[in-house]
Amino acid sequence: MTTVHVSIRGRVQGVGYRAWTADEARRRGLAGWVRNRRDGSVEAVFSGAGDVVADMLAACRRGPSLARVEAVEASPAGDDVLDLRAAGEPFSLLPTL
């Protein structure tokens, strides 16, 4: 299992990026969460098989059609970051922080 903490920058708010990320992560069977940040970035955590997480990171570099991704930074994370998910949800959309 691989768990990463991700920051995505560019035009990634107001373009459906957060919902797209949740859909893509759920489709891949990943655990984690996604939320908007007040600085205009999107923050996410993905946890799953290493190749699936790598595929998700590649997808995040493209994003949905209206997004303009400038940077995706990922760093290894412990499983404790998954605790922010809503109870019973493998992947959650969290409120803006």
Image (cartoon, rainbow, N blue to C red):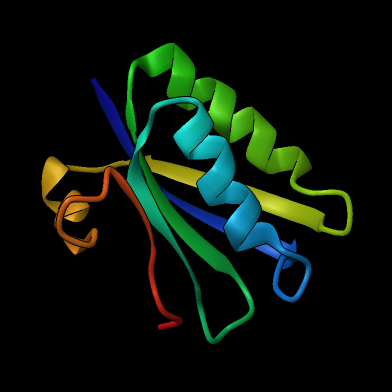
Q: Residue at the spot x=58%, y=83% of the render? A: 39
In the figure, 27 relative to 19: above or below? above
As drawn, the residue found furthest toward the top would be 51
Left or right of residue 97: residue 71 = right
Left or right of residue 3: residue 93 = right
Q: Quadrant of the N terminus?
A: top left
In the figure, 93 relative to 58: above or below? below
In the figure, 47 relative to 48: above or below? below
Frontmost residue, 36 versus 27: 27
Q: Quadrant of the C terminus?
A: bottom left
Q: Residue at the spot x=72%, y=65% of the render? A: 12
Left or right of residue 95: residue 9 = right
Q: Residue at the spot x=59%, y=61% of the render? A: 18
Residue 79, given in percent of the width and then of the height, sits at 14, 42
In terms of image quadrants, where is residue 24?
Answer: top right
Frontmost residue, 74 versus 14: 14
Frontmost residue, 73 versus 15: 15
Q: Residue at the spot x=45%, y=13% of the render? A: 51
How many numbered discs? 0
In the figure, 77 relative to 1: above or below? below
Residue 26, given in percent of the width and then of the height, sits at 46, 37
Left or right of residue 71: residue 15 = right
